[in-house]
Amino acid sequence: MATERMVISGGGLAGATAARTLRAEGFNGPITLLCAENRIPYLRPPLSKEFLLGKAGEDSVPVVLAGWYEENGVELLLGNAATAVDPASHQITLLSGHHLEYAKLLIATGARPRAIPLPGAELGGVMTFRTFDDSLRLQSLLQDGGRKVVMIGSGWIGMELAAAARTYGNDVTLLGLEDIPLSAAIGPELGRYFQHLHLEQGVSFRLPASAARIEGRDGTAEAVVTDSGERLPADIVIIAVGVVPDTALAEVAGLAIRNGILVDSGLRTSAPDVFAVGDVANALHPFTGEHHRSEHWSNALNGGKTAARSMLGQDATFDVVPYFYTDQFEASMEYSGFPSLASGLSPVIRGALTDESFIAFWVKDGCVVAGMSVNQRRVHKAIKALITGRVRVSMDRLTDPAVPLEELLPTP
């Protein structure tokens, strides 16, 4: 395969990690990495957390330094995304109009912000949030404080951005369709924990509520009107109602799609020599026997490694337990597990929600299927081992902070 071109369509963490892994695994043929943005691949989690808050600089965001690509013979095409794929001829068309032949193609096109038909969304001061440039723009708008911010969306990004805006000293009102923020992801009990955290810091909520329209003057937003008719003054309006997988390239190629590009546990699509990874991929997970699509960095990082090995013909399986984290005010949360298995279950708490730190577990048929820690470090290796080992646990010991989690694992 030394002379066969590997093409990676998508310049995020998954695509860059795949390129690195191809080289680490000894592939010395041509690699082309296509980036829709005019930036080298970067990490997204800091954009709504430490970078947005000014706690980390631009040098903390790239996946690898710019020089790595040239040093390792990876052709990096910035601002030149793929527009079409022909699996039969193994050819890809670029935005520039040029064509590339590939031996193996990896689609890592990620996701795009969900659009909602909201009158006034085109006004100045209204934005979505996804890219590095979005984070730079929002930081410049928030950092002096004193602005009126209306956040539309009560998911993880909406809550993180609300926390950042309030930390900078802005007035923040958050709208969401749920009675309790984050309840669809982690249930009402833990959703209330995060809501209380925000309320203590001065964030206001309108729940459940949706935006009916955005009003403005001279082309700039000045208020959000809710479905109940309430008028909320706004200098900045952020629409954060989730993302949708960017499957446009896969649709042109005729690939199987269902909530993303369907792939097997080796991240192979329905077309020969075409793979998919990251936010855009709906992958078969061997642990559950179901397809899962994850929008978190751990999925992109570990999936990029698996995809590269599959492209090289290795027997690679993407079997990593899903993981993500969030930072909101003084709470640092980590989650490991399968949300689909935890759905509908009430969490059991190690400690108490009123404590500075605690762990929540979701248990099904006597086994842990997910675990969430707040302000606790170095516990997720054990939580993942409990999950993958299908360890039957005693509720008394699982919820007792005096019992180390490692003691719940089987003796080797």
Image (cartoon, rainbow, N blue to C red):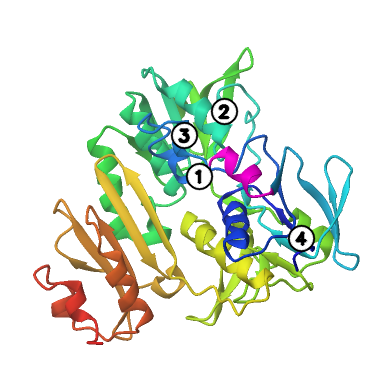
In this view, 57 is above or below 30: above
Residue type highlighted by circle 1: Arg
Q: Disc 4 or 1, which lies upstream in sequence?
A: 1
Mark 4 or mark 2, which is nearer the start of the sequence? 2
Q: Main secondary structure of the magenta part?
A: helix
Numbered disc 3: secondary structure: helix
x, y (%) of residue 274? 75, 67
The residue that disc 4 covers is 250
Give me the C-alpha separation between circle 3 and circle 2: 28 Å
Q: Which residue is painted at 42% across and 34% down in the image?
A: 51
Q: Residue furthest left?
A: 402
Q: Residue 71: within the magenta?
A: yes
Question: Which residue in the structure is indicated by mark 2?
Answer: 126
User: Would residue 17 be counted in the magenta stretch?
Assistant: no
Circle 3 residues within 10 Å: few <14, some 14–19, many ≥20: few
Q: What residue is pinned by disc 3?
A: 59
x and y percentages locating residue 295 in the rendered image: 53, 56
Magenta span covers which residues?
Answer: 65-73
Circle nearer the N terminus (4, 3): 3
Residue 198 in sight from this viewpoint: yes
Depth check: 181 or 243 in front? 243
Secondary structure at numbered mark 1: loop
Mark number displayed over residue 44: 1
Amino acid type, label 2: Val
